[in-house]
Structure formats: structure tokens, C-alpha cells
Image (cartoon, grey):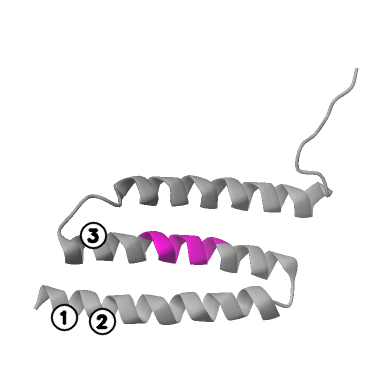
Amino acid sequence: MLAIACQIVLILMSISIFVCFIRVIKGPTMSDRIVALDTVGINLIGFIGVLMILQETIAYAEVILVLAILAFIGSVALAKFIEGGVVLDRDRD
């Protein structure tokens, strides 16, 4: 029963990732695209988590951690770029 539920969840998450990619491509504003990219990252983390449950292993735990860190840093960098147009500030005194 758990395997069937996990497979249904994987299908639904795949559809969600596909819809988010469409929003990344067609998004009306840059903010919508950033939110969609962040949502894709969160969905990928959940997708891998469900795969770990389905396969009964913790082999992908490091992959989840790396994806979470990259999604967070990417969201912060893109938000900062939209706010000021510069990601890394170089203060020259």
C-alpha cells in the first residue's frame, strides 16, 4: 500500500515540476520565475525524499542537502539581483 501511495505521489510531483517549468518559461514577471524555480527545487527535494522512502535507503540524503543549499543560495542571489542589479557588492574604499 505504501509503494502505491509513493508512486502516486511521484506522479503528482512530476506534474507539479512540469507545471513549474512552464511558469519559469512563461512567467509574466521575473519574480514569478524566481518563485517557480524555488518551487522546482523544493519539489525535487520532496521527489528524492519519496524515492528514498520507496527504496528504503538513505543514500540520497547528501543529494537532498546539496539541493536545499543550492536552492536557497540561488533564490537569495536572484532576489538580490532583482532588487539592485548586482549580486556581489564590491566596496572599494
The residues tagged by marks 3 and 1 sit, at their Cα atoms, a distance apart of 14 Å
Label 3 packing within 10 angstroms: few (<14), some (14-19), many (20+): some
Q: Indicate yes or no whether the magenta region holds residue 82.
A: no
- 9 over 85 or under it: above or below: below
Name the amino acid type tagged 3. Met
The residues tagged by marks 2 and 1 sit, at their Cα atoms, a distance apart of 6 Å
- The residue positioned 67% from the left and 47% from the top of the image is 77
Report if the CB atoms under discs 2 and 1 are less than 8 Å apart.
yes
The residues tagged by marks 2 and 3 sit, at their Cα atoms, a distance apart of 15 Å
Q: Position of residue 88 (x, y in %)?
A: 76, 37
Which of pointers 3 and 1 lies earlier in the amino acid sequence?
A: 1
| Helix, strand or loop: magenta stretch | helix
Q: Position of residue 79 (x, y in %)?
A: 69, 52
SS category of the residue bearing label 3: helix
- The residue positioned 8% from the left and 78% from the top of the image is 1
Label 1 packing within 10 angstroms: few (<14), some (14-19), many (20+): few
Name the amino acid type tagged 1. Ile
Residue 92, quarter of the rendered image: top right
Q: Which residue is mark 3?
A: 52
- The residue positioned 54% from the left and 61% from the top of the image is 38
SS category of the residue bearing label 1: helix
Q: Which residues are magenta?
A: 38-45
Q: Which residue is mark 2?
A: 8
- 12 over 73 or under it: above or below: below
User: Looking at this rendering, what residue extends furthest in the top direction?
Assistant: 93
Residue 10, quarter of the rendered image: bottom left
User: Looking at this rendering, what residue extends furthest in the left direction?
Assistant: 1
Q: Which residue is mark 1?
A: 4
Name the amino acid type tagged 2. Ile
- 71 over 48 or under it: above or below: above
Label 2 packing within 10 angstroms: few (<14), some (14-19), many (20+): few
- Position of residue 86 in the picture relative to residue 39 (left or right): right
